[in-house]
Amino acid sequence: MNTEWISIVVPCFNEEQALPLFYSELEAVRKKLINADIEYIFVNDGSKDRTLKVIKEFASQNPIRVRYLSFSRNFGKEAALAAGLQHAKGDYVAVMDADLQDPPELLPEMLALLRTKAYDCIGTCRITRKGEPPIRSFFAKRFYQLMNRISDTEFVDGARDYRLMTRQMVDAVLSVSEVNRFSKGIFSWVGFETYYLPYENKERVAGKSSWSFWNLFKYSLDAIVNFSEIPLTIASFVGLFSFVLAIFFLGVIIIRTLIFDDPTAGWPSLVTIILAIGGLQLFCLGIVGKYLGKTYLETKKRPLYILKETDQNQKEKN
């Protein structure tokens, strides 16, 4: 039986402390794989620490299995994922974080399930959020509930980017050429049969997460804009409701003036109504502006990332 190759795409941003532990764990798992081998694709996303140097050490020790891509600056995890998928050559492609929150020991089981041909993708899903800040867990659950209400694309609560995909599914994901990417949504949007392996939440083994609450909030807004038009519909209904409300109050003012002959009273209420309607208009303009801004970014056709260095460059120099 021919050996099947698994490309492991690993986005890295300031992960010098976690990388040695991650690599050691994956090497231990690799030796347990049957008729399969691993190709590592580390993507250095503009790290400011020794991440790139650590990756180069791996590549020098194991040039056959270790490849790397290094960006000219920090382009974000979505760009790093896209770059890794584009350069992956394996029969199967996995996406994993370097902090070991994605359990490498699940990989043999994921591969076995894919080999049954019953599924095109084996994903992972946290059944608990133990160790995560309560406020973060609360808003994460609300986000998934909201997305499943306003979007036609399914979003699984607790799902991670960590998954193992067939080559056909990877090609489908890469065919989605949008610049404003939300990978969890894209993985679901392209379809294909997906099975989620449940596991207990794991904390980072080293280093510090670059995902602050504010970054996650902005990321969630991108997901909403990318996979739902409901906010635009809400803006339209808010505008219609404001117009109907204004007509109603106009009728009240006219009737009150005709009956009570008191046209000068009510300045506080009038100012309140003006401010309320003005606020609703700005809110709706903000929603429209968000969609317009995303469209503007797409039309500029800028590259998703810029490579500064790869393992291939180094091999050619040597």
Image: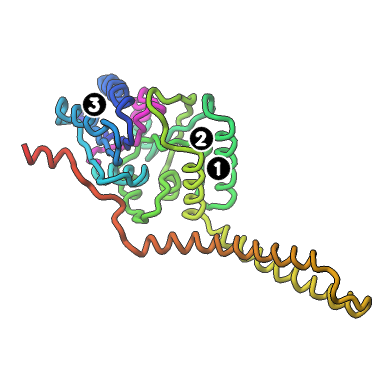
Q: Residue furthest left?
A: 318
Q: Is residue 139 visible?
A: yes
Query: Where residue 158 is drawn, which disc sits there?
Result: 2
Residue at position x 24%, y 28% from top?
Answer: 36
The answer to which of marks 3 and 1 sits earlier in the sequence is: 3
Residue at position x 46%, y 34% from top?
Answer: 196
Q: Amino acid at mark 1?
A: Tyr
Q: Is residue 168 visible?
A: no
Query: Where residue 292 is drawn, which disc sits there?
Result: none
Q: Residue furthest right?
A: 259
Element under label 1?
helix
In this rendering, which labeled residue sits more in front, label 3 or label 2? 2
In this rendering, which labeled residue sits more in front, label 3 or label 1? 1
Q: Is residue 273 left or right of residue 295?
A: right
Q: Which residue is mark 1?
A: 144
Q: Residues within 10 Å of mark 2 (few under 14, many from 20)?
A: some
The quadrant of the rendering that contains the N terminus is top left
Residues shaded magenta:
88-112
Q: x, y percentage for residue 179?
A: 36, 55
Q: x, y percentage for residue 211?
A: 44, 37
Element under label 3?
loop
Quadrant housing residue 287: bottom right
Q: Is residue 91 magenta?
A: yes
Asked whether disc 3 touches disc 1, contact meaning CB atoms under 8 Å apart, the reply is: no
